[in-house]
Amino acid sequence: MVQYNNMKHLMENLRVKTNIPLNLVKKVPRKVITSLSDDQVYPQSCLKASNDYKFFVNFRRDPIYNRVLEHVSYGQGSEYLKLLYDRNDAEILYSISSFKKNDLYGNPRMYEYHKIGMISPTTLRYIKVLSDLKMHFQTLNNFNICEIGVGYGGQCRIINAFYKPATYCLVDIKPALDLAQRFLDNYIIPSTLSYKTMNELDKKNYDLVISNYAFTELPRVIQDVYLNKVILNSKRGYITYNEITPEEFNSYKANELIKIIPGSIILKEEPLTDPKNCIIIWG
């Protein structure tokens, strides 16, 4: 979700936002960058939030964490809410109070919105995705779901507050998974959860695969792993596509993905958050 042209830009931006001297940022042990969010500093924020209760209490306001997640603006939240009202889905709107429980942990920035009161705009975005899934697939009950790139588990919790999937596999880097588990352990989740890194994934048929930006922020060589293990074996899919990776990632473009994924089509992202963004959906 973070729009960086290259890793040098990312590191400089991190230095400015966090006041960490650039020479110290560069001293973080080097590793293979597997995605835009795997910048060696964001994972440390996730790890600290999963292990340190005092940090977990406010992790959704951490400047480093906010470079990747929890940066949806008040205005964007208003657009998501307007779309929900325009769709006039009584079931979704009636459940807002249940969805707002997502904001009980991590101390997110919340704003007062007309008719619904205080809520995080990030939570409104997760509700909008749920509304999309309901509109396209009707139900997710008894589904085996896989989500690629899970943040702190917010989308998973929103889905499980409305539907009852049979299983839900969360896939991300290990520090993010640890944080997601700490977050989700605070709730009663009807589906059986599993937490897996890319290399722990088995090749498996899923009823639905979801990825909000994360899949399209990966290098092509990593995308191929997920295509082979998950995406091409899933009956249905919902991918929020963005085009922000550096040239060296050689990430798949939207028109390439719909040629690879059988039955997939491109839909307009509503509301549009970037001119190149779109939704890739199938099934």
Image (tube, grey):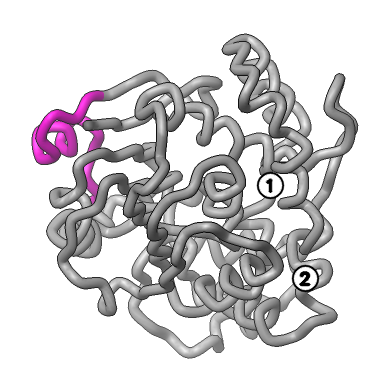
Q: Secondary structure at mark 1?
A: loop
Vertically, is 229 above or below 30? above
Quarter holding residue 56: bottom right
Vertical comparison of 183 with 144: above or below: below
Magenta stretch: includes residue 101: no
Q: Nearer the viewer, residue 168 or 68?
A: 168
Instruction: Give, as a three-letter code, the residue at label 2.
Output: Asn
Q: Position of residue 64 (x, y in %)?
A: 68, 66
Q: Which mark is residue 71?
A: 1
Can residue 139 be seen here? The reply is yes
Q: Residue at x 82, y 67 (%)?
A: 58
Q: Nearer the viewer, mark 1 or mark 2?
A: 1
Disc 1/disc 2 C-alpha distance (Å): 19 Å
Give the residue at mark 2.
19
Q: Is residue 180 left or right of residue 280?
A: right
Question: Would residue 152 appear left or right of 73 to someone viewing this image?
Answer: left
Percent across and percent down for residue 72 are 68, 40
From the viewer's side, name the closer residue of 124 and 29.
Answer: 124
Near-viewer residue (159 or 55): 159
Q: Position of residue 11 (x, y in %)?
A: 56, 67
Q: Which residues are magenta?
A: 251-265
Instruction: Find out whether the residues at labels 1 and 2 contact each other: C-beta distance under 8 Å.
Output: no
Identify the residue at image location x=83%, y=59%: 107
- Residue at screen point 35% across, 56% down: 146
